[in-house]
Amino acid sequence: MRKGGIASLQAVSWRLALGTSMARLVQKFGGSSVKDIEHIRRVAKIVSDSAREGKELVVVVSAMGHTTDELLSLAENVNDRGDQRELDMLLCTGEQVSVALLAMALQKLGLKARSFTGAQAGILTDETHTYARIKTVQPSRVETSLRRGEIAVVAGFQGMTRNSDMTTLGRGGSDTTAVALASALKAECCDIYTDVDGVYTTDPRSYGKARKLHAVSYEEMLELASLGAQVLNARSVELAMRQKMPIRLRSTFDPGDTGTLVTSRELAPDYQICGVALDTNRVSFRLSLTHDFSVNEQGADSEYLHYTNKSERLLEELSSLGLVREQINLVYNGDAVVQVEFNCEKRLAREAKEVLLEYFPESNGAVLTVDTDVARISVVGIGARARHQRGDIIGALSAAAIPVSMVSANSISVSAVVPGKFKDDAVRQLHETFCTAFRSEDS
Ligand code: ASP
Ligand code: MG
C-alpha cells in the first residue's frame, strides 16, 4: 500500500487505543450534533464511552442548532449597525447553553463533568470583535479539572480580550477552539464530530456522487476550507498545520466510523485533485470607470495621475479589509484603470462597497454593479494548476455552457465565479471531469 490513507489513519487510532496510561483527547461537537436535548444525550453517550475507555477528555461544543443565526437575526432587527462588542456579548450566550446542558447530561450518566466558558478555559484573543484571533491559551483551570478526573466541557467559538471583553472567533470558530485547546493541552488528537462522516471530494449533502477521503493533508484541507468547504473552519486547519495536531473528522451519528484524518503531507495520499469546493457566501463587485484619458487635453495628465493614485490607495484599502490583492482584477485601457473587479465574503461586502464609493463616487460617472447571487467554484489539488494551464477547467465549464468570470489560481487550486443558478451544474461538471479518476488506494 502506498503512503497515507488507511495506514496512517490506523496508526493514529492504534496509538490512541493503546495509548500511554491516559490518552488525552479533545472532542468537538458542532451545532447539528447538539441541536436538541435528545442529541445532547447522544453526545453525552459518545463522550462517556470514550471516558470509560480511559481517556482524559476535553469536550468543545457549539451552540445548539441554528442558535447563532437566530441570535444574529435578533441583533439585526434591533440595530443593523450595532456595536460589534455587543454582538459578541450576545453570540457568546449560545455556546454557554450547550456546555451547561452537556455537563448536566454527563453528570446524569454518572460521570464527573464541569463546564467552562472560553474565558474560563483561558482562550485569550485580540480585540477584533466577531472575528477575533486567538493569541494564547492558558488552560490552567481545564488542567485542574482533568487532574480531578473531570470531563472538561468548554464553550467553543468564544474568547476574551486582555480587558476581559468577550469575543467570538468568526463563524465556525468552535473548530479553532478545539484545535487550540488540543495543542495547548498536548492532546494526542483533536476529534471533530459533525453530521457527515468525513471530508468528501465535494459536499455530499448536495452532490450524491461525492467520495470520501480517508486522509488528506493539512495543505489541501486548508485550501478546501478556505475556498468554501463547510466541513472544517479554515483557521482551525491553519492552526493544526502549524502545531502538527492531527484532526479526525467524524460523524456523531456513526461514531464507530474512523472518518477522515487530516495530517501532514508525508502521511496523506498524493491526490492530483482532492476535491471541488463551492462557496456561495460571496458577493461580486464590478466598478466601471468612464473617464477618458485618451484625449490628451491640458490637465488630463494631472487628472490621470490623481486617478492612478486613487486606484493604488483603493487597492491598499481593500487589502486591509482582508481581500487578497492578487484576486482583485484590474482592467486597463492603455495605462488607465477602467474597471475594478473582485469578489469577497458577504461579511465584508458593506465595507467593501463603502470603500469603493468613497474613492470613485457614482456621481462622478463611476458605475458600480454588485451581485450577491454568485458562487465561487474551485478545483483543489496539486494537479489543478496544470489543468488550468491547459485550459481544462475553464473548458469543462464552458462545455456545459456555464458562464465564467473572475478566474484565479495558485499552486494548488483554481477558482472561478459563476452565476448562482449554475452552482450545482458547475459542481457536477467539475466533479465528473476531475474527481472520478481516483485510484482505489487514493481513498
Ligand atoms: N456557533 C458558531 C457558529 O454557528 C460557532 C460554531 O458553530 O463553530 O458559527
Ligand atoms: Mg462547523
Image (tube, rainbow, N blue to C red):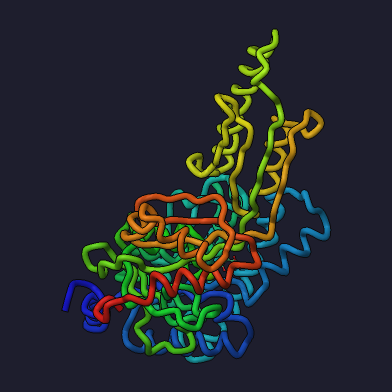
Q: Indicate the position of residue 378 as horizontal and vertical percent values.
A: 47, 61
**Camera-side residue: 115 or 208?**
208
Residue 140 visible somewhere in the drawing: no
Q: Which residue is painted at 71% across and 53% down in the image?
A: 86
Q: Indicate the position of residue 135 as horizontal and vertical percent values.
A: 45, 49
Q: Which residue is painted at 26% across and 83% down in the image?
A: 17
Looking at the rendering, the quadrant in which ligand 1 lies is bottom right
Q: Looking at the rendering, which quadrant does residue 281 occupy?
A: bottom right
**Camera-side residue: 289 or 172?**
289
Q: Which residue is painted at 61% across and 67% down in the image?
A: 422
Q: In this view, does 20 lie above or below 130?
A: below
Q: Which residue is painted at 68% across and 50% down in the image?
A: 85
In the rendered image, the quadrant that contains the N terminus is bottom left
Q: Is residue 309 above or below residue 190?
A: above
Residue sticking out furthest to the left: 1
Q: Indicate the position of residue 115 as horizontal and vertical percent values.
A: 53, 72
Q: Is residue 138 above or below residue 65?
A: above
Residue sticking out furthest to the top: 298
Residue 365 visible somewhere in the drawing: yes
Q: Is residue 438 left or right of residue 424?
A: left
Q: Is residue 7 left or right of residue 398?
A: left
Q: Indicate the position of residue 87 as horizontal and vertical percent values.
A: 70, 55
In the rendered image, the quadrant that contains the C terminus is bottom left
Count the labels in the image: 0
